[in-house]
Image: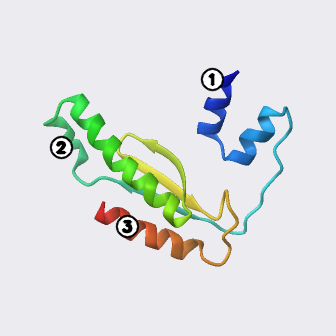
Amino acid sequence: SEQSASILFSLFPEHVAQAMMRGEQPEEDRRECATVLFCDIVGFTELSASLSSSAVSAMLDRLFSKFDHLALLHGVYKLETIGDCYIAVTNLVTPQPHDHAARMARFSLGIMQA
């Protein structure tokens, strides 16, 4: 169904979701190394305590939308957002063996300005 496809594509990289939609086992990808970013917002707990839940949600949505745009720009794959934590990776979904750390560094500098 369309809803199942939407869920698969929101949870998995595109090539994995497509294989699963066809009822196939996704091909195994192996990488020697990857770069992972865990980004947590400093002071978020205190800030969120002083705002309504809708204001906190809107703030995170605006911020993470900027992060998502920067991720696309730098070839970074967003793995997950959990509360105020943004988790991203390079050289996992797309082969980037020679510049994955530099991509993540540029992305990190960009999100600090967001």
Q: Residue at x 23, y 42 (%)?
A: 45
Q: Which of 88 and 5 is in front in this view?
A: 5
Q: Give the spatial CA distance, label 3 vs label 1.
A: 33 Å
Q: Which is more foreground, mark 3 or mark 2?
A: 3
Q: Give the spatial CA distance, label 2 vs label 1.
A: 35 Å
Inspect the image, locate mark 1, and give the three-letter code of the amino acid beneath it: Gln
Task: Say which quarter of the image contains residue 108.
Answer: bottom left
Determine the secondary structure under disc 1: helix
Q: Which residue is drawn at 49% across and 59% down?
A: 71
Vertical arrangement, residue 21 with respect to residue 80, above or below: above
- N-term mark: 3 or 2: 2
Q: Residue furthest right?
A: 24
Vertical arrangement, residue 92 with respect to residue 105, above or below: above
Q: Mark 2 points at which residue?
A: 47
Characterize the local packing of mark 2: few (<14), some (14-19) or many (20 or more) Cα atoms within 10 angstroms.
Answer: few
- N-term mark: 2 or 1: 1
- N-term mark: 3 or 1: 1
Q: Give the spatial CA distance, label 3 vs label 2.
A: 22 Å
Q: Position of residue 32 (x, y in %)?
A: 72, 69
Colouring scheme applied when the structure was drawn: rainbow
Determine the secondary structure under disc 3: helix
Q: Residue at x 59, y 71 (%)?
A: 100
Inspect the image, locate mark 2, and give the three-letter code of the amino acid beneath it: Leu
Q: Name the residue under label 1.
A: 3
Residue 110, numbered label:
3
Question: Which image quarter holds the N terminus?
Answer: top right
Inspect the image, locate mark 3, and give the three-letter code of the amino acid beneath it: Gly
